[in-house]
């Protein structure tokens, strides 16, 4: 029996952390990596920022080269002798008088001029394409980091136990024409 003047002290209850899916998603939307911090998956933050860093570097590299080749193509095809930024992209060992109609109007080779013009235009298209793909990749990576925070919060307390088995079982199958063949069957067992 408990005396009238004593109090029973209850043991403190430990609450199991259970992240809210909407909160994790909104945190990931507001700032990349914040949803992963909320879900207590700190190890994913370097992966998120390494992906952003690689894609931002790729966009900058391709954008810089796109600008270089675009300026070189414009200078190569205009009729102004003073604009010669294309010399940065053409090998210095090549004699300028063989391909430049402004530098050597009578002695240049039109096929070499056409070759360099087409090559510069191809490089413009190449770097523009990969610059644009890098920007699309940044948006995609942002969506993947949001989706990761959402799914991780949804499945945070998911119980993985031995109650579910998935196995492949060999079976004998009837084939057209009365033949027998070998196959695989997917066997799913749930134990209660």
Image: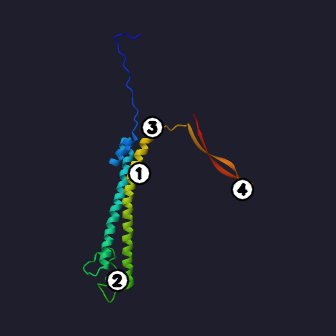
Disc 2 target residue: 99
- Residue 107 picture quarter: bottom left
Looking at marks 4 and 1 on the same chain, the residue that comes earlier in the sequence is marked by 1
Looking at marks 4 and 2 on the same chain, the residue that comes earlier in the sequence is marked by 2
Circle 1 SS class: helix
- Residue 100 picture quarter: bottom left
Disc 3 target residue: 157
Residue 56 locus on image (x, y percent): 34, 58
Circle 4 SS class: loop
Disc 1 target residue: 144
Looking at marks 3 and 4 on the same chain, the residue that comes earlier in the sequence is marked by 3
Neighbour tally class for label 3: few under 14, some 14-19, many 20 plus, Cα within 10 Å = few
Task: Please indicate whether residue 131 sits to the left or right of residue 161 in the image.
Answer: left
| Alpha carbon distance from label 2 to label 1 | 49 Å
Residue 54 locus on image (x, y percent): 36, 57
Residue beneath the point at 35% across and 61% down: 59
Looking at marks 3 and 1 on the same chain, the residue that comes earlier in the sequence is marked by 1
Neighbour tally class for label 4: few under 14, some 14-19, many 20 plus, Cα within 10 Å = few
- Residue sitting at the far front: 22
Looking at marks 2 and 1 on the same chain, the residue that comes earlier in the sequence is marked by 2
Task: Please indicate whether residue 157 sits to the left or right of residue 131 in the image.
Answer: right
| Alpha carbon distance from label 4 to label 1 | 46 Å
Q: Is label 4 or label 2 in front?
A: 4
Residue beneath the point at 60% across and 40% down: 189
Disc 4 target residue: 176
Q: How many marks?
A: 4
Residue 183 locus on image (x, y percent): 66, 51
Q: Is label 4 or label 1 in front?
A: 4
Q: Is label 3 or label 4 in front?
A: 4
């Amino acid at each position: 029996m408990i005396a009238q003047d004593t109090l029973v002290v209850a043991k403190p209850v430990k609450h199991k952390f259970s992240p809210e899916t909407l909160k994790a998603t909104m945190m990931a939307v507001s700032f990349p990596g914040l949803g992963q911090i909320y879900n207590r998956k700190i190890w994913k933050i370097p992966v998120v920022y390494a992906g952003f860093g690689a894609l931002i570097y790729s966009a900058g590299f391709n954008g810089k080269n796109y600008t270089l080749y675009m300026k070189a193509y414009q200078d190569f095809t205009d009729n102004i002798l003073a604009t010669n930024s294309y010399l940065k992209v053409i090998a210095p060992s090549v004699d300028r008088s063989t391909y430049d109609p402004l530098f050597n109007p009578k002695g240049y080779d039109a096929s070499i001029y056409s070759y360099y013009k087409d090559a510069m235009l191809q490089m413009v298209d190449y770097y523009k394409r990969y610059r644009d793909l890098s920007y699309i990749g940044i948006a995609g990576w942002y969506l993947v980091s949001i989706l990761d925070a959402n799914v991780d919060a949804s499945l945070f307390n998911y119980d993985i136990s031995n109650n579910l088995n998935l196995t492949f079982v060999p079976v004998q199958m009837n084939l057209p024409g009365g033949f027998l063949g070998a196959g695989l069957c997917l066997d799913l067992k749930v134990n209660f």
